[in-house]
Image (cartoon, helix red, strand yellow):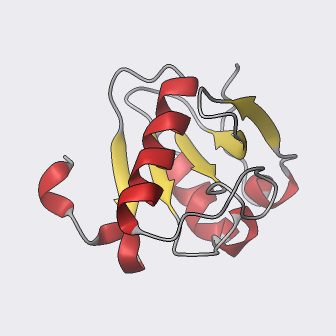
Amino acid sequence: MTATSAIVGEYQALPNQVIGATNGVEYAYRELGDGNPPLVLLQHFRGNLDNWDPALIDTLASARRVVTFDNAGVGGSTGVTPSTFTEMARDAIRFLEAMVFDQVDLLGFSMAASSPRRSR
């Protein structure tokens, strides 16, 4: 896995990558920028990689590594769409484990931001 330095407009042109997780789901994701810990962006229910504003992602990735992904059963990811917050959180954890991230910073909105006490 190789992160790339951000160039304005780059996020929109990035192809989706896919990684398999222990829950059997193949998660579609995009990765841009450099540095650790990565900033992982959590999407709202049924939102996919293309719902993120490319200008926001490019700006964030100019200063750090940014990772976006499709939840299970949404967009380019396989599996069944979670029906509860708990299932969505478990799916996100499976994605993070598949990516072998030791530590991440999280940015979520809508219901993805409902438990800020659990993250940095």
**Left or right: residue 98 compared with residue 110:** right
x and y, in percent, of residue 94 in the image: 50, 35
Could you tell me how many numbered marks the image carries?
0
State the residue at coordinates (72%, 57%). Answer: 8
**Left or right: residue 54 compared with residue 13:** left
x and y, in percent, of residue 40 in the image: 47, 47
Between 8 and 91, which is closer to the camera in this rendering?
A: 91
Residue 65 visible in this rendered orientation of the protein: no
| Image quarter of residue 23 | top right
**Left or right: residue 90 compared with residue 24:** left
Between 3 and 46, which is closer to the camera in this rendering?
A: 46
In the image, residue 97 above or below residue 82 = above
| Image quarter of residue 29 | top right
Between 44 and 22, which is closer to the camera in this rendering?
A: 22
State the residue at coordinates (37%, 76%). Answer: 111
State the residue at coordinates (82%, 55%). Answer: 76
x and y, in percent, of residue 102 in the image: 36, 20
State the residue at coordinates (44%, 24%). Answer: 101
| Image quarter of residue 47 | bottom right
Residue at the extreme bottom of the image, as rendered: 110
